[in-house]
Amino acid sequence: MGEFRPRIVVFACNWCSYAGADLAGVSRMQYPPTTRVIRVMCSGRVTPGFILESFRQGADGVLVTGCHPGDCHYISGNEKALATVERTKRLLHLLGLETDRLRLEWISAAEGARFARVMTQFTEQVRALGPSPLTEHATRSTQYATRDTPHHR
Amino acid sequence: MAFEEILRQTRSLLCLDCGKCTGTCPVTRVDPTYSPRATIERVLAGRPEELINNDHLWACLTCRLCTTRCPSGVDYPAFVVAARVQARGTGVEGTYAHNAVMQELMGLMTLPVKQNRTGWVSGQMRTAAQGEDFYFVGCLPYFDVIFADLGVVSTEVARNTVRLLNRLGITPVVSDDERCCGSDLLLNGDEVGFRRLAELNVRTIAESGAKRVIFSCPECYNAFRNDYPRVIGPLPFEVVHLTELLAEHVGELGLGGLEETVTYHDPCRLGRYQGIYEEPRALIQAIPGLELVEMRKNRAQGLCCGTTGWVNCGQCAKGIQITRLRQAQATGATRMITACPKCRIHFTCALNDVGEEIPIEVEDLTGLLARSMEE
Ligand code: SF4
Ligand code: SF4
Ligand code: SF4
Ligand code: FES
């Protein structure tokens, strides 16, 4: 059996964490190829629905990243993100998923090294938990295929 | 199902174009461009795509108020739900409330999750893993998390239900493997997900050895009573709403006096869908000292709580909710009692918006009965 390579969805805010990821990239820092980064304008844009949808589509872990407290481009979006992550952890617990599969981190545009370190640590954390109990069933069930391109009217 | 078939099954073919539905519809009151009559007319004229690609498809509350007036017996809400299934098949969905968190949870519950949803059970309550009676709790534990900001603790309903059942000598089964009943998924047009949840729930209940399932939520009850048999066939157990069961044994509850004036809001799925109007009223009136006053619109004419299926909540919903709360206020009651956890959430949401302007409290019937039992 091959080594378990977790699938991790990372939400990164446009103004800090995404730039931090860029810096890690252009500085050629090494971190595991387990992540799929989704850029959002602010960590405050991430909703419980986004996080749950990630798990439903087969994520083994979800990482929400934003600007450090006081640095959010929209003043308090990251405070909202903190509340969202706490709330979603409670939902994950009800659903029987380990709350450690979800993590929140503040990463600034200057912290490329920190971005790489957090990715490595979180990958280890998720690897220790093993595959999400939902993964084999969650990936692309035909029932939700239409959800990829919803037309909200 | 093709649209011709939907028109036939829901009797929409017999529409007389009289407009009584539009005249009664609470949505039309707030949004005059909304017309169930005109919608049927467009589909009858062979243009179903005009419905599928129209927001009005998601505006219907499926409250059934129009069906109480229609001279031809057209089942407009059933027509709408069938049309939503069609729409979803072409990739069209409504605009979901709360960023679709309910839809996500319902979707996740179709997967092999091992939930922890019975954390609300506390020490003094008697519950079981196997037994004759199954208490179907519904998604109350999830509501507690999602609506924490509203200050609504939905699992109170579950705790009070168990207390009431225990008082009658019933030790109900509660299960971590219960799923969402799927009623809202069906309202969103997801028949596949609905069927999956129905199968999982029926299996869980059957494995508990239950012969009877007791519901505190009218939507779960209606799903089991009306929709499950239609979609997955006859159920291997009996279903009963808590108010029906309690009304039969009201003398054994030991209700104590409460000096209050309350009014009662009929949830659409308990009232118009199941015809349960008198049982909740009998329970309220069994409380010594309590006065029940009726709203101008009650029983079969009762107004909906303004939003269903966690879809399309907005200005229109708020308008309907405020109208209903004003009707309650006009009775002089201090509390509006409802028997549906979702009605309670939606009304509390509207009350939070208007603040002091409407000084009325929304309470679940189980809460009222539990308070009276403690007296
Ligand atoms: S079911 Fe209710 S909301 Fe829908 S058209 Fe009829 S009256 Fe209007
Ligand atoms: S009330 Fe019935 S017959 Fe009249 S327009 Fe509406 S659906 Fe048609
Ligand atoms: S009324 Fe409030 S709680 Fe209910 S769906 Fe609308 S926004 Fe959500
Ligand atoms: S912009 Fe980075 S968290 Fe708000």
Image: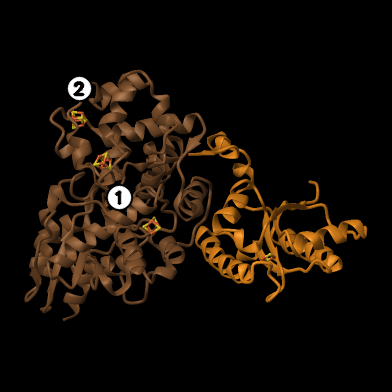
Chain colours: A orange, B brown
Q: Quadrant of the C terminus of chain B?
A: bottom left
Q: Residue at x 30, y 20 (%)?
A: B44
Q: Residue at x 44, y 54 (%)?
A: B177
Give x and y (percent) for residue B337.
20, 65
The CA distance from mark 1 to mark 2 is 28 Å
Of circles 1 and 2, the one toward us is 2
Determine whether B295 is above or below B107 in the image: below
**Same chain for the residues at labels 1 and 2, yes or no?**
yes
Whether residue B339 can be seen here: no
Determine whether B355 is above or below A122 in the image: below
Q: Amino acid at mark 1?
A: Glu
For residue A142, side relative to residue A18 (left or right): left
Q: Nearer the viewer, residue A9 or B180?
A: A9
Subunit of label 2:
B
Q: Residue at x 76, y 68 (%)?
A: A107
Task: Give the residue pinned by disc 2.
Answer: B14
Task: Give the residue pinned by disc 1.
Answer: B219
Give x and y (percent) for residue B244.
16, 55
Q: Residue furthest front?
A: B32
Subunit of label 1:
B
Give x and y (percent) for residue B344.
30, 62
Mark 2 residue crowding within 10 angstroms, few (<14) / some (14–19) / many (20+): few
For residue B336, side relative to residue A135 (left or right): left
